[in-house]
Image (cartoon, grey):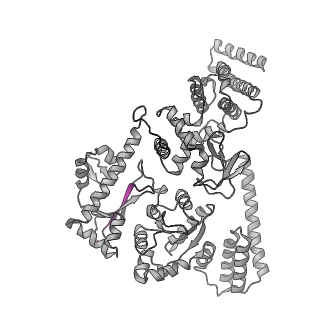
Amino acid sequence: MAIPEEIINEIKYKNDIETAVSPYVSLKRRGKNLVGLCPFHGEKTPSFTIYPENGSFYCFGCGVGGDVFTFTKLIESLDYIEAVKLLAERSGISIPESGYDDSYSKLKDNIYEINRETAKFFHEYLMSPDGKWALDYLKGRGLSLSTIKHFGLGAAPNSWDSLINHLKSKGFSISDMLAANVIGKSQRGTYYDRFRNRVMFPIINIRGKVIAFSGRAMPDDDKAGAKYVNTADTPVYKKSENLFGMNFAKNSCDERIILVEGNMDVISLHQAGFTNTVAALGTSFTNEQANIISRYTKEIVLMLDADAAGQKAVKRAGEILKNTGLEVRVVVVPDGKDPDEYIKKNGKERFDALLNGAVSEIEYKLLTAVSGIDTDSDDGKVQYLSRAAQIIAESNDIITRDLYIGKMSEKYGISRTAFNAKVEEIRKKKAKANRKKEINNIIHPKFDNSDVNPERRKYPSAVVAEETVISVLLSHPDFFEQTYEKLKPEDMITAFNSRIYSLVCNCINEGNNPELSYFGESLNTAEFSFLTSLFNSESGRKNSLTVLNDSIKVILDEKTRIKMLDSANLSNDDWAKCMNDLIENKKRG
């Protein structure tokens, strides 16, 4: 392993899985294990399981799994080595610098340093006489100097190489600057600053590190092209997994978090005292961003534009937030203004009143559903009430449904009984469709690991046998010698299981106990999650030796059968050997 195994084991021993998970997931004991709502996907019924006995976790909903290092890696958006380092630091364990390949980790450290130095360069330029044009723009948008400094705002000179030359003087390489995405490379092979003549917004993660930039063009710059230029995904930044302003909002969001659309909205609201405001980063709101917010608060207020795009964004965010456990409320800013414009024109008190008047998601949908419909006409009334029934039927809370059924009936002068019947009719149809979907998922499971083993559907019986062999060996490494004597990695039918089996065999053959942490650097997240499911499988726990031998026989028989099917390409000697193997396998059976 890259990091010595004894170091890995010590870190794992001092960071038990339950302690690592409990700050992010509310766990309840179920027998010898613990369960909770998965932090990696939305769900209402707990399918996230902790196995304290072997220090692993597995979600039966989304199929993610692993050990304490995997959990830390995923929940903190780190790579494997960074997760190990973080847990080592938490437990006061030092990792020797030699003995492992940390080139990728060093690259990430260099990118962090480049970003920090770049942010400093942009801010110093903004505060210099040459940057007065950008400072005047920000002041004209109503920002104070203290707010500008608080967010580390800056400006990029109208130059093709100012930043490159500055970073070179600090000892950074061109290759690392490219990896950080602060410079670009032309078709002619020359290098240039990516951000030019723009106001710069550094993007800072929840651990306080600069991870990316967003550059806004000046309103009068006809040659700027796109209004915003943003850092592309890099080894330290994925826009779908971060939120602008979250580094500050996480410290003041006990009651709620406000989600707005733009960076300037966030900054203006923070300046006015609403420091619990965040924004998505140049992308639609994502599941990852919803999961981050759900770790810090219980309520989210969506404050998005009132136009058609804003309504669509609210609908999408509502779908994503549905299973996070967060209470969702919506604010419609009057006159189609964005929060930045509204708070400048009307002040903090009016904005606070607007915020306190936030409606529930269902009420927002009912308000916007009337758009384009003449409810004074009978046809229009029927059309709107049909939409309203669909919206109310989405709620699984009987009290909420009853409340809005009553409101709609009273407002539009229709029979409460008739409107309730319409809502229940829709719910029955939806329940029937869901049952059909559930049955289909049982017959064709969504999480069948076909992504990690694409040959699963081609050789279903062999794959089950291969997985059973691996599972038994993980639980009973003392069976290794007799298993390896009968079954070599090349005897496995599928390439993926052959690789996993080989890793397990090498681990045991080297005298190591096959713990999950041994395989952490050899497998990607999906593969490691799959191995975790085998590690906790019950298939090989009972009558394990019998099950093991039966599975080996299935694999060898299948291998012989495949060869026989390909007999047209076999020599006489190979064909005779296949026949002999088949006879011997039958005798052993």
Dividing the picture into quadrants, the one containing residue 58 is: top right
Question: Which residue is nearer to you in this view: 382 or 503?
Answer: 503
Q: Which residues are magenta?
A: 207-221
Judge left or right: residue 131 versus residue 387: left
Dividing the picture into quadrants, the one containing residue 137 is: bottom left
Residue 85 appears in the picture as rendered? yes
Q: Is residue 494 above or below residue 247?
A: above
Residue drawn 33% across and 73% down?
Answer: 144
Dividing the picture into quadrants, the one containing residue 483 is: top right
Q: Is residue 442 above or below residue 213?
A: above
Quarter in which the C terminus is drawn: top right
Q: Is residue 449 above or below residue 466?
A: below
**Residue 161 position in % (x across, y down):** 23, 53
Residue drawn 62% across and 45% down?
Answer: 57
Residue 194 appears in the picture as rendered? no
Judge left or right: residue 131 versus residue 3: left
Residue drawn 45% across and 57% down?
Answer: 206
**Residue 546 position in % (x across, y down):** 76, 26
Q: Does the segment drawn in magenta span residue 220?
A: yes
**Residue 582 position in % (x across, y down):** 73, 18
**Residue 551 position in % (x across, y down):** 72, 28
Q: Does the segment drawn in magenta span residue 50?
A: no
Question: Which residue is nearer to you in this view: 178 or 110?
Answer: 110
